[in-house]
């Protein structure tokens, strides 16, 4: 008889544990918490839809591209051209190549001795639009 009494409470408690039912949680409070979670998810989704700057790249420079001074370009023996920037505040020199990200939504596409072409991406609704920005470089004569 003792064995049967011990088994019966264990059998009744197992289904409640398996279903995640807790008799001490207020069901109204639980519904309220679920509604708050749903509302937070909807707000997050709405923010992602309305944000105009998609986060597509990890920038290789610390500041905004416009805060740096373009010093010029350098031609490599391999035929590639590198963009030379300098930070006016620290004096640090930065070398960028084609394909480097300069912002979360912009990357360098083409570097030539006279200009730098940058693709900047913008989000409008559900579409991502590509803008082409061209930075003209000053021509320096050697000598």
Image (cartoon, rainbow, N blue to C red):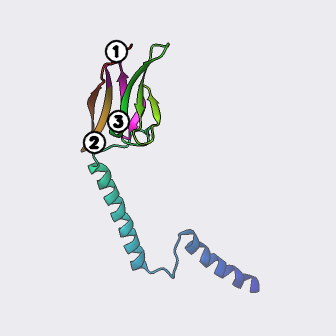
Looking at the image, is mark 3 or mark 1 earlier in the sequence?
3
Q: Main secondary structure of the magenta part?
A: strand
Which residue is at the front of the view, 41 or 90? 90
- Of circles 2 and 1, which is in front? 1
Residue located beneath label 3 in the image: 106
Per the model, the C-alpha gap separating discs 3 and 2 is: 12 Å
- Corner quadrant of residue 74: top left
Per the model, the C-alpha gap separating discs 3 and 1 is: 30 Å
Q: Is residue 101 magenta?
A: yes
**In contact (CB < 8 Å): disc 3 and disc 2:** no
Say which residue appears at 31% left-offset and 44% top-offset.
53
Quarter of the rendering occupied by the C terminus: top left
Task: Count neighbours of disc 3 (C-alpha within 10 A) and say few if under 14, some if 14 to 19, many if 20 or more.
Answer: many
Residue located beneath label 1 in the image: 141
Say which residue appears at 27% left-offset and 29% top-offset.
132
In the rendered image of this protein, does residue 1 appear above or below residue 87? below
The residue most toward the front is 143
- Of circles 3 and 1, which is in front? 1
In the rendered image of this protein, does residue 135 appear above or below residue 75? below
Mark 1 residue element: loop
Relative horizontal placement of residue 51, taking residue 60 as reference (left or right): left
């Amino acid at each position: 008889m003792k064995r049967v009494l011990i088994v019966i409470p264990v059998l009744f408690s197992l289904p409640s544990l398996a279903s995640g039912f807790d008799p001490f949680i207020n069901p109204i409070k639980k519904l309220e918490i679920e509604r708050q979670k749903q509302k937070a998810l909807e707000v997050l989704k709405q923010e992602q839809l309305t944000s105009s700057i998609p986060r597509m790249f990890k920038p290789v420079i610390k500041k905004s591209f416009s805060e740096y001074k373009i010093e010029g370009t350098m031609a490599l023996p391999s035929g590639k051209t590198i963009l030379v920037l300098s930070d006016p505040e620290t004096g640090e020199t930065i070398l960028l190549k084609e394909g480097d990200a300069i912002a979360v939504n912009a990357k360098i596409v083409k570097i030539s001795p006279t200009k730098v072409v940058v693709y900047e991406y913008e989000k409008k609704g559900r579409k991502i639009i590509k803008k082409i920005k061209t930075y003209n470089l000053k021509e320096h004569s050697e000598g």
